Amino acid sequence: MEDSISENFPEAPVATSEHDAPQTTWTDEDTEEEDDGTWEDVFKNADDFPVDYSMDFKDPEWEVSEPRDMKVDVREKSCVDTTWMFKLRKNLDQLDSFYKQKELNVLKAREELKACRLHLTELEKQREDVELDIEREKQAENSVAVFRLRARHKCLCAQLQGEEELEAHLAMVLQEHELELCEVEVELGRFLSLRQEVEQEEKNFQAQKQEKHNQRIQREKNIAKAARLRALRAKNEQEKTLQEQAELDQRRRDQFLAGRQKAVVFLKQTLNRMRQKEAEREEKKKELMKRRMEAAASLKANIAATQETQRVRQAKEKARLQKQREYEKRQRESLQAAGVNSIKLMHLQKAQEDLHRKQEEFQERQKARQIEIVSKLLLEEEMKEKLEKRQALLFPSTPPHMTQSAVLKRREKRLLQSILPLPPQPEREESPIRCSVSSSVSSRSDISISPDFMKDERRNEGGKTVVGIGQQECLIQPEFTGLWARKHSDYTGTTDEDIPLKAAHLRSTKTGLERTLASKAGKKSAGGKELKGPAFVSKPEIVLFKDFDVGKTYKKKVVLTNVSHATNYCRLLGVSQSLMDFIAVSFEPPGPMSAGMACEMKAVFKPVLNENLEGEVQFQSATGPFSVIIKCMRKKCEMVVDSSLIDFGTHVVGQTISRVITLTNRGALGTRYALAALSTNCLQLHHLSKNSSSSVQVLGKSSSVKLATSYCAPEEIQPEHESTECITQSDVKSDAPPVSDTSLGVEVSRASQDSGGDGLKESTITGVDQDGSEVNEISIGEVHEGEVGPFASVKLPIVFTPTIPGETKLDIQITFSQPDCEMIVVSARGVAESFPVWVTKPSMDLRICMYDRLYQDSIEVQSRASTALKVTFEVCKELKNHMKILPKTGFIQAKSSFHAQLKFLPRRSLPVDAKSLFDQDTGVLEVPLFIQVADQVRPVPFTVHAVVTTSDLEFDRTKVDFGHCSVFESVRTSIRLTNYSLLPQDFGFVGIPKFINVQPNDGFGTLLPLQTLEIDLIFSASKAGEYNFKLNCKSGINRDFMLSCRAIGVRPLLELSGSVVQFGGTAVGDNSTAVLYVVNSHTSCNEYTHPVPREGKGPIPPVGPRLFAFATPENSEITVTPATGRVLPGQRCLVQVTFSPSLSDDDIRAEAVRLVCHSEELRVQEFQKAIAEASYSTEPKTVNQKETQQDAKKGKKPSINHGSGRLSLREKGSKTSLTPKTDSPFHPPNPADIQKGSNEYAAGKASLLRSFKERYRRYVIPCFVSNSDITQPEYEESVYSPYNTLYLELHCPAVRPALLVISDNGETTVDFNLVLVGQKVLKKVTIQNISSECMKLKSSVLDLYGPFSVLNAMREVRPGDTHTLLLAFIPALAKKYREMLEVSCSKMTLEFTLCGEGLEPLVTCSLEGGVMNFGYVLEKESATQVFTLQNSSSLLVQFSVLLDSLCPSKHSDNCLLPAFLSAHAIPHTTLGTQNYSGQSVFTVSPIGGTIGPGKSQDIAVTFQPDHESLHYRDILRVQLMNKQSMCVVELRGAARCHTMFVCGGDALDACYESLIPNHIYSTAQTERTGAEKPPTPVLLTLKSVYGEGRVMAATRELEVGCIRTAQPVPKKNVEFLWENVAALHQHGFSVDPTKGSVDAGHRRTITVTWMPPAGHTPNEVVQVRVPLILKGDETEVYSITLMAYISHNTHSG
C-alpha cells in the first residue's frame, strides 16, 4: 500500500440532503459491507473511477483555496468549509468501516483457524485410538476387525493431511488479514490529526448551528412580539372605530326619531288627502262606469243597426251582381250571334274599366300630393319674408343690379324645378278625356305640371282651388325635405285664395340692401384718371366649390388686391340671396389700403341641398361696389366612350375576335351602366305595335303598349318619357331608355294571356320566336352591367364570333342609372369567310395516359376544295419531345380525306417543358395543333386533350421499424400505400421472408385512382436477434417499390402458458374465469443447449427469480388475480383471469332518458286520443233540440241524458284542459342528473338488459417482467424492461342474461343494515327468467353457522315467470357480516352479496340495587311501584317481563331450609308466600312490547296480597328478543291484617308457607286462635365486643310502623308501650323510647342497647323476655326476647 492517498479523496460523494448531513454522531448507512473489499474499492468517487494515492492530505490542494484574483465572501467560504468537512467526515467514516471490516476478517480467520486446530486434535486422538484398537485386534487375531480398522485409519490419515493443509492455508490467510489490519491501523494513525481537526470543525459547526438556532428563535420572538403589538394596536383602533360607529349610530337614531316625529304630521295630512282623492276617484269611476254602460248600450244598438244595413247592402250587391251577370250573358250571346269574339272583347272592356278606375285613383292621390307641395311652398315663402326683413335691418343698401323680383323669380323657379321637372311633351288639353273600349289612354303629359302653368293658374284663377290646376298625379319625390318637413299648423289650412296674393306681395317687395347698392352705383375716378373695372381683384377670380357632398364643410381663402391707383378701402356688404343659407364669409375690414396691398377673406360653404348654386359676395370700396363670384357645382356624371364604331374586319368562320371599348366617367358622381343590343329591342317593339293595332282599335301605338304594361304591373305606372318615346318613334334615338328583350316579351305574352284573344296571343308569340331565332354573331362580352366610379373608366369587351359567312352588324346601347346621363349607342360590324379544310374530330381525347408509355390515335382531315392541297402538321415546340404526327406533310386530294398517325409518349419532363399547356395540379394537358394548308393564311386548328398521370405507388414512410418483438408475440404495423395515378393499378408483395406476413389478401390487390390502402405488416420473430430486410412491391406495369424494414427479436425472461384466452359467451352480470401460468424457464445461461432469454444480440441475463405485474386497463371488465407475483427459476405461478361484462353508466342514463321521452310521447298520444274521442262523441245541439221538440209533440217527456253534463263539461274544458300547454313544453332530462338507485336508472338498466345484443370485445393486457430480483439489496435501477413485456390477448363475448333481478331496482346487494343481536329480519329478492327457455335454479351453500340463510327452496322458472328468494338474517354477535350467495342456472350465475351488522341493544333500567320492596300492606289491598326502561340504541327493541312465580320450576326450591337452620347466611330460594286464591301476588304491566330508538318505557309492578304474611317474595326478569336478561329485580312485600307492625328482629320462621288455609286442618284450633291469640315472638340478639381492655356496648333497632289505609278504622295512629322495663335494666338493657305513638304511613325506631353489667361472666348469655304492646285498630302483644353475649372475635357470629 502506498504512503499517500488519492487526490480524488476530497471529491468523494457528499451527503446532499438533510438526512445525510451528520449532526453529532457520524454514521454511514449507505456503505455496503464487502467480504473481500480493498482500500481502493472504498475510496471511489461518485463516478466509480479508481482512486489514485499519489497525493498527500497535507498538500495545499487538499484544502479549498480561493483564487488570488477573486475575493470570496464569508458565506461562500463557510459553505465551502462545510462541504469540505462533510466530505472529509464521510471518507473518515468509510475508513473506519474499512477498519472494522478488516478487523472482522481477522477475527473470522482466527476462529476458523482455531476450529481447524481443534478438529485436527480430535482426528489425531481418533487415529491413536484406532491404532490401539488395531493392536488389540491383532493380538486377538480378528482379521476382519483389523481390516476394517485399517481402512478407518487410512481415512483418518487422509483427513489429517487435508486438515493440516487447511490449517496452513488459514494461517497464511490470517497473516494476510493481520497485515492488512496493521496497514489500516497505520493509515488511521496518519489521519489522526486530520480526524481531530474534523471533530473540531464539527464542534464549531454545531456551535454555529446552535447560535443560528438561538438567533432564529430570538428573531421569531421579536416578530411574535411585534405581531402582538400590532394586534393590540389594531384591537385598540377597532375599539375606537366601533365606539365612533356607535356614537354615529346613536346620532343617526336620534335624527331618525326626530325626523319620524316630523314625518308623522305630514303623513297624516298626506293620508287625508289620499283618502279624499280616493273618494273622488271612486265617484269618477262610478260616473265613468255609468257612461260606459250607456255607451255599451248605444254601441250594441249601433252594431245591430250596422248589421242590418250590411245585410241590406249585401242583398243589393248580390242583386246587382246577378243583374250584371245576366247583362254580360245577354251581351255575350249577342256578340256571338254577330260573329265577334265576345270573350276577348269583354275582357278588354273589363281591363279598360279597371285601368280607368286606377287612373282616377292615381289622379286623386296626385291632387292630394299637389296640395301638400303648395303648402310647403307657402311655408318656404313665409320663411323667406322673415329672412329678408332680418337682412334689411342689417344691410340698408341694395345693389342696383339685384332686384327682389329677380331673386324671387329665380328662387321660385329653382324650387319648382326641384319639385316638378319640366315634361318633354307639350301641354295637352285641360279637359279630361273619357276613355272607352275604343279610345286610348291619356299620355303621361297630362299628369305632369310645369311651373309656368301653375303660375298662370294661380294668377288667373285665384278663387278656384288647387285641385282644379291639374287632373293628374305626380310621383316625383324631392331629394331632400328642407323646410317642407316642418308641419306647421298655420299653413296646413291655407286656402287657394291666399296663394296668388302672397306670391304678388313677395314679387313686389324690395330689400333695403338692394336700394342702398343701387344709390351708390356709378363710376369713380382716382387721381384724375378714370378707373375701368373693379378697384379690387380677387385671387382666384371665381371661388369654385366643385363636386361637394351634402353635410360636409368646405373652406377657401380669397386674396383681395387693391389695383386702383390710390388708397382705397373695402367693406363687406353681404352675399347673394341664393347663397345666404349656405355660404358664410369671414372678413375683417383692413382699413385704408395703398395701391398693390392685399387682404384676405375666408369663405365657408356648408351645402344642405344637392343642387348647383351660383352667386357673389358684394363689397363696397371708395370707387364703387365690386363682387367676388362664387359657384357651387354638385357632383355629376359625364359618360363618354373612346369610339362609337367598332369594325372587326374580315375573318374566317370559327375564329373569335374581341375588341374593347373604354367607357370613361369624367364626373365626380358614380353610376351604374347596362349594355344591351338595340336592334332586337326595336324589332320586338315593332311586332308588339303591329299585333296590338291589328287586334284592338286604339288611338296610338303608345296607348296599346301602355295597356299591355298595365296588365303586368297594375299598381305601378311608368313615367311617360320612359315608355312612349321608344315605341312611337320609328327609329331609335340615343336618349331613349333601354328596354330589355325579355321584359317586353314577357309583358306582351302576359297581356295576351289576360286578354284571352287567340289572334293576339298567336301573333305575339310568333314575333318573339322569330326574334329569338336570330343568332347574332356579334355579342357583348362577360360584362353586361356594372358600376363606374368617379373619374374612372372600365373596359367593355365586344366579341365577334363568325359562324355563317357574310356581313354582320349590331347596335349596342349603353344606359345609365343617373337620370342626367344620356344613352350612348355604339355600332359594330364584321365580315366572315368559310374554311376549305377541316378536321373531322377537331378535339381528340386521348383520355388518361401514364408517363413513359406510348399512346396512338388517327387524325382524319377532310377537304371541300376542288383541287389537291398540301397540308403540313405542326406540333408546338413544348411537345416536340413528347408528341409526333406521322407523316408530317401530305397531300389531300380534291373532296377527299387524309389520315395521319398521332403518337404520344409523355416524358417525366412534361410539366417543365409544357408549363403553359399542362396543369400540374389536375394533370390535364390541352395541346393546340395546327394544319398548315398551302395558300391559306390561317391554319386549321384542332386540339388534343389528355390527362397525364403518374404510375407511382408511394409508401407513407420509407423505413419500417418493428422495434423489439417477443418470440411469443407478433408485432403489427400499418403502412399506407397510395396510388397517385388516375388509373387503377395492380400491386403485389413478392419474395417476402417467412417471418413476415402481409395482409390483406397476402399482399396482393388493386388500387383505385388516388386511393390509399392501409396494409398490415405482421412480424413474428422466430428467435432472438436482429432482423434487417427489404420488402419488394411490384406494380402491374412491372415497377418495383422497395420498403426497408428492421426489427429486433427478444426472448422474454418469463413465459405465459397461453397468450390468447377465448372466453365463452358470458351473460351481463355473470363472470367467467380462465387459468393460466407464468413460467420462469430460465435455469441455465448455456445458449447452445436450449434457448435463453436475450434482447437481440445483447448479453444473457443471470439466472434468478423474476417479478411480474399485469396492467389491466381502468374501468374495464377484466380482473387478473394475482396482478403481481414472484417466480423462481424453473417454477410457475398460477394466474386467474376473470371477465365480468357490465353495462356502462352513460348507456344506462341515455336509455333512461329515452324511456322518459317515450313515456311522455305515449302520454301525449293518449291525450290526443282522448281529445279525438271527446270530439267524436259530441253531437250538435240542434239535433238534440229537434228530438226534444218531436218528443214533446208526441207527448213524450224529453229523456234526460245523464252524460250530457259530463259531455258539456268536456266541451267547455276542451279548450283549456284537453289542449297541451305550450307555455311549459316537455324538456328531456339531462342524463347526468339521473342518479344511481333511482327508478329511471333501474328502468334504463332493465331495458338494456332485456334488449341486450351480443357484443365482442378484445383486450390486450401487458405483463411487465423485472430484469432482476428487486427483493435483493443490489438490484438494478431499471426494474422493468419494456422489451421483456408479455402480452395476454383476451377475447370476451358478452350475451344477454337469462335471469334478471327485478326487485329493489335490480340491486344484487342485499343489505339488512343494523339488526339487533338475536333478532330475525327477512328480505325478499325476486328473479325473473327473461330467456326463452325454462331455467332450473340452484343456489350455493351458505355458512351453516352464519347469520344468513335461505328459507325457501329453488325451483324451475318458465320463460317470463319470476321466483322469489326469502332470505333471513339472525346476528349472534355485535359485528358486521358479509357473505356471497350464488343463484345459478344452466346459462349464467347471479351473485348476491348478503351483508348486515349485528348491534347489541343498549337498554338500561332505572331501578338501582336490584330490589323492589313494597313494605307492609294491609291484606287484600294493593301497592304499586314503577321503574323505567331506557332504549339508548338506534333500533327498535322488543322486551318481555317474566316472573319466577309463573315459571314451571317455581316449586323446585321449596325444600330448602330456613335461614336459622341453614349453613348459609342467605337462603337460595327465590319465591315466597303466595296468595290463597291462586292469583299472583305481584302483577306487571305491560308484560311486553317495543321501545323505540331513544325512547323509554314505564313498567308498573303491583303488590296484591290476600292474607297476612311477612314473606311475600318473587323475582322479576326483563328479557330482550335474544333471550338475554338485561334486568333482574327481587320483589318483596309483607301483609298484615291490622294497621300496626313491628319489624327489625331476627328471622324465626321459613320464608315460605303452605298455600292451604289454616282452618282446613282443624276447626277447633281456628276457633281457639280467634279467641285467644298468643303474643307474637320477636328475637333480638345483641353482641358486645371486647377489645383493648374494655367492653363495647351492643345496639339493635326495632321499628314500629302504622300502615296507611283507605278503609275506615277506629284509630288512625298506633301507640306502643314496653312493659317490665325494670327487668331490662337489671340485665343491662336499655330501651329508648319505652312508649310513643306512630302516625299512619310512618315508622318509628326503637333503640335497644346492652351494656354488660358489673360482675357479668364473659361467657354467659343473657336472655330476657319483655312484652311490647301495640294499640291501634286492635291491641296486639309482641313477646320481645332480648339475648346478649360478649364476643372476643369481631368477625364471628
Image (cartoon, rainbow, N blue to C red):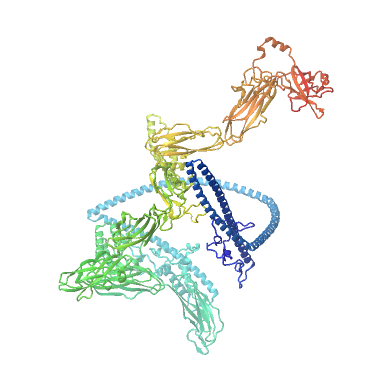
Q: Nearer the viewer, residue 126 or 816?
A: 126
Residue 124 in the image: above or below residue 176: above
Q: Nearer the viewer, residue 67 or 1073?
A: 67
Of all residues, the one furthest to the right in this rendering is 1654
Quadrant where the N terminus is found in the figure = bottom right
Quadrant hosting residue 1340: top left
- Residue 219's spot in the image, x, y percent? 68, 59
Residue 1490 in the image: above or below residue 313: above
- Residue 539's spot in the image, x, y percent? 48, 81
Residue 1261 appears in the rendering: no
Residue 866 appears in the rendering: yes
- Residue 231's spot in the image, x, y percent? 69, 56
Q: Nearer the viewer, residue 1418 or 837?
A: 1418
- Residue 686's spot in the image, x, y percent? 27, 66
Q: Residue at x 22, y 66 (%)?
A: 856
Q: Nearer the viewer, residue 19 or 1202?
A: 19
Residue 382 in the image: above or below residue 1087: below
Report the number of numbered marks: 0
Residue 1643 in the image: above or below residue 343: above
Quadrant hosting residue 1284: bottom left
Quadrant where the C terminus is found in the figure = top right
Q: Residue at x 15, y 69 (%)?
A: 896
